[in-house]
Amino acid sequence: MVESVDLSRVHLVGIGGAGMSGVARILLSRGAVVTGSDAKDSRVVLALRSMGAKVAIGHDAANLSLAGEPPTVVVTSFAAIPKDNPELVEAQRLGIPVIRRSDLLAKVMEGSTQVLIAGTHGKTSTTSMTVVAMQAAGLDPSFAIGGQLNKAGTNAHHGSGRVFVAEADESDASLLTYAPDVAVVTNIEPDHLDFFGTPLAYFKVFDDFAALVSDTLIVGLDDEHAAALAKRCLDAGVGCKVVGYGTEQACAQHPSVPAAAVVSGVETTASGSHFSVALASGEVEVDLQVPGLHMALNAAAAIVAGACVGGDPQALARGVSDFSGVRRRFEYKGEVVLQPGTEAVQVFDDYAHHPTEVAAVLKASREKVEQKGSGRVIVAFQPHLYSRTIEFQHEFAEALSAADKVVLLDIFGAREEPVEGIDGRIIAGKMTTSVVYQPDFSQVAATVAKIVRPGDIVLTMGAGTVTMASEEIVLALQERAGA
């Protein structure tokens, strides 16, 4: 934790990223001088400039002078930005403090009632639902989300209320930077082992996070490791209230954890799903615009978190029902009627990049197809990181095999260097469904368009560049329809 830092002039390296841009928006709203740099121009960068930020494209030591005088602090992501970045080197030469984005967010949240959403999966969706629910309850929270709310069109906001809602990212243990009053742990499943080394070390960071919670810890009981965390906290007598949420079966399996929300009657509908949530104050009905049991559970967590800071449960439920999604979380990209009189092909894009996430999204897609009564599930999947692909190759193959047909892209290495002899085929060879390995990104849309039949649901899936293929697939289907 950074004890003291001057936030009057802040320079953010990689300012166009989801996390960085959100904190930049809040700083600008509070009157700080904000500068930054990014590798390329984008809509996010343009929006920040319109708010008053000075942003350079490309990384250069001279960028520290964008505001006319040096910044009081430089912010970076140690995972995404190399240590030899010229702006970081120049900051060190000038003696300017260099801190992580999580350190900055912790300082920005000081003085607020902090609601932090943690877990291996579902952080962005749950954080987003929590924000929308609280807004509907009149709380006007400040928030910083790792994705863009479809309805609000932004990833951050400086609210007038006392509550600040944010994601707590465990990938580099930065969640331990915060001082949560209320915290949600959606689930815990070994990930980011390139940083933690062992599953045990990964589990421990959540125990350490739970120990920081001052008021209420809210835990998903449908996940065995999260439920185990709740029980450890109760046994240890941690200094906060511990409650759970989940399906009727999960809550019954863990009677020692007080159930704050019990989800039942989940039904897939044409627009998403409908279900009931039993709270201590009574039952609420939710009509969610995004499908899947995992999303219903996220909604329950959001309602409980909102209630913990004074939100009316009925208003919170109405807010969640109004939630229209987050960019890249089962995001609707378009639909095309291939032949007159046939059902349209629908195209969605999703950020899922871990086997459990892939399985959950495909399950929701299958339910959507079954509700329609026809069609198949077609997936274009891009593995993310060599380390994750090697570690979970069998689990990825099993999860993807729930689709009817898969177009498998090559691995998106992101911050990692290629590993000799390793590509997307290590997953393809273990799958039990029809799969086409397509390493040429420029041919992905055409490959998918040839496979698709009327009524199919098409998903582009992964944390890398595959998102760009979703709109190309829509165009390729339109060309096929017009041929």
Image (spheres, grey):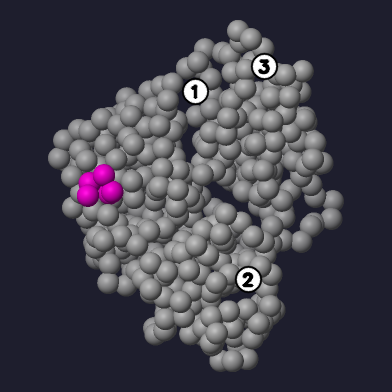
Vertically, is 296 above or below 178?
Answer: above
Is residue 14 left or right of 262 when viewed as pictured?
right
Question: Looking at the picture, which amino acid does disc 2 mark?
Answer: Ala
Report crowding for label 3: few under 14, some 14 to 19, many 20 or more residues within 10 A (C-alpha).
many
Of labels 3 and 1, earlier in sequence is 3
C-alpha gap between disc 3 and disc 1: 23 Å
Residue 56: image tag: 2
C-alpha gap between disc 3 and disc 2: 44 Å
Residue at point 52% right, 37% down? 331
Residue 441 picture location, percent across and down: 78, 42
Residue 480: say if magenta: no
- Which residue in the structure is indicated by mark 1? 367
Question: Looking at the picture, which amino acid does disc 3 mark?
Answer: Leu
Viewer-proximal residue among 225 and 30: 30
- Which residue in the structure is indicated by mark 3? 338
Q: Which residues are magenta?
A: 134-138
Of labels 3 and 2, earlier in sequence is 2
Report crowding for label 2: few under 14, some 14 to 19, many 20 or more residues within 10 A (C-alpha).
many
Residue 150 picture location, percent across and down: 45, 43
Residue 43: image tag: none
Whether residue 303 is visible here, answered yes or no, is no
Residue 88 picture location, percent across and down: 62, 80
